[in-house]
Amino acid sequence: MTTGFDPAGSRVLITGATGGLGEALARAFAAAGADLLLSGRDRSRLTALAESLGGAGRTVAIVNADLSREDDLASLVAAARDFQIDVLVNNAGALAFGLYEDQSWPDIARLLETNLAAPMRLTGALLPWLRTRPRAAIVNVGSTFGSLPFPGFAGYSASKAGLRGFSRALRRELADSAITVVHVAPRAIATPLNPPAVDALNRALRSHVDLPEAAARGIVAALRAGCGLRHLGFPERLFAWLDGVAPAVIDRALAGKLATIRRFARPIDTRKETS
Ligand SMILES: NC(=O)c1ccc[n+]([C@@H]2O[C@H](COP(=O)([O-])OP(=O)(O)OC[C@H]3O[C@@H](n4cnc5c(N)ncnc54)[C@H](OP(=O)(O)O)[C@@H]3O)[C@@H](O)[C@H]2O)c1
């Protein structure tokens, strides 16, 4: 059976380390005593982060990679093997907010590629390596919307629900191995992922918005506990569970919020016409 994983002394690859949650995760894993391989697209931000975290006997390396590029994925896999990782944190992600009928397929395809296909490909490519480690872990960063699909976030919800399904199946497949698979679903976090319209919607709906540091602590705690699936935050955890057992209750609650969601999800010109 898979169990908890103590990150102290481990070697951790974090994707999306240049982002709001990724940087907080890097700091949380460093504080937990891990060596870090930080990945992202923005080399100058990666370098600055590595410089701020290096020293004190800790190794911090960086690898520049765009997860939508075949050759970058291959270099990332090679760098992860060279670094001898034992923890893969699939954190990089993208968001497209808006009514589905207003969104273009390239936007949706980008979401599926970044949030679902890239973590699946990276995991598949690194599994043979992780199997050689005495203990290893894969941490997938999902979202509440992966269990509580939300209007205005259809493509994003689909990508995160897909990632949740992948994490759960893989955990069951690896149950008799030394690899722990953990899926963590944060609620809203104050990071650049959310455009101003989403920030405004969160205020209008009085949604809880966590600081990245709090979400990062929750993710490291879920790894330590070896949770198969952990939703961060209450009552979001309850709503996610309720959507599984009594979806009509959530349908009714969200139908009551639809006019508000539409107001923020519509493109500006349409919003003017309907206001
Ligand atoms: N913020 C929230 O409300 C929230 C809530 C629940 C879950 N999450 C999840 O938390 C994770 C981190 O998001 P965040 O809030 O920290 O967002 P963020 O600040 O926008 O950071 C996203 C990170 O992903 C990277 N990334 C995006 N596309 C990439 C690509 N094609 N190749 C390589 N890297 C790519 C970005 O790199 P660049 O900096 O180079 O663009 C950045 O480092 C995501 O999986 C997100 O879905 C966020």
Image (cartoon, rainbow, N blue to C red):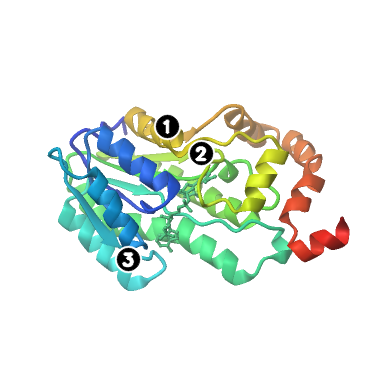
The residue nearer to you, when weighing 132 against 188, is 188
Q: Is residue 93 above or below residue 217?
A: below
Q: Is residue 153 above or below residue 31?
A: below
Q: Is residue 135 above or below residue 104?
A: above
Whether ligand 1 has any atom under 8 Å from the Cβ at mark 2 is answered as yes
Q: Residue furthest right?
A: 274
Instruction: Name the amino acid type tagged 1.
Output: Gly
Instruction: Name the amino acid type tagged 3.
Output: Leu
Q: Earlier in the sequence, mark 2 or mark 3?
A: 3
Residue 9 sits in which quadrant? top left
Residue at coordinates 38% horizontally, 53% vertically from top-left? 18
Q: Secondary structure at mark 1?
A: helix
Residue at coordinates 55% horizontally, 67% vertically from top-left? 109
Marks 3 and 1 in Cβ contact (< 8 Å): no
Mark 2–mark 1 Cα distance, whole angstroms, equals: 8 Å
Q: Earlier in the sequence, mark 2 or mark 1?
A: 2
Marks 2 and 1 in Cβ contact (< 8 Å): yes
Whether ligand 1 has any atom under 8 Å from the Cβ at mark 1 is answered as no
Instruction: Name the amino acid type tagged 2.
Output: Pro
Q: Secondary structure at mark 3?
A: helix
Q: Secondary structure at mark 2?
A: loop
Label 2: which residue?
Answer: 186
Label 1: which residue?
Answer: 218
Label 3: which residue?
Answer: 73
Residue at coordinates 55% horizontally, 38% vertically from top-left? 187
Residue 170, visible in the rendered structure = no
**Where in the figure is residue 92, as x and y percent of width and height?**
42, 54
Residue 203, visible in the rendered structure = yes
The residue nearer to you, when weighing 79 against 216, is 216
**Where in the figure is residue 117, as x and y percent of width and height?**
45, 61
Mark 2–mark 3 Cα distance, whole angstroms, equals: 26 Å
**Where in the figure is residue 85, as x and y percent of width and height?**
21, 48
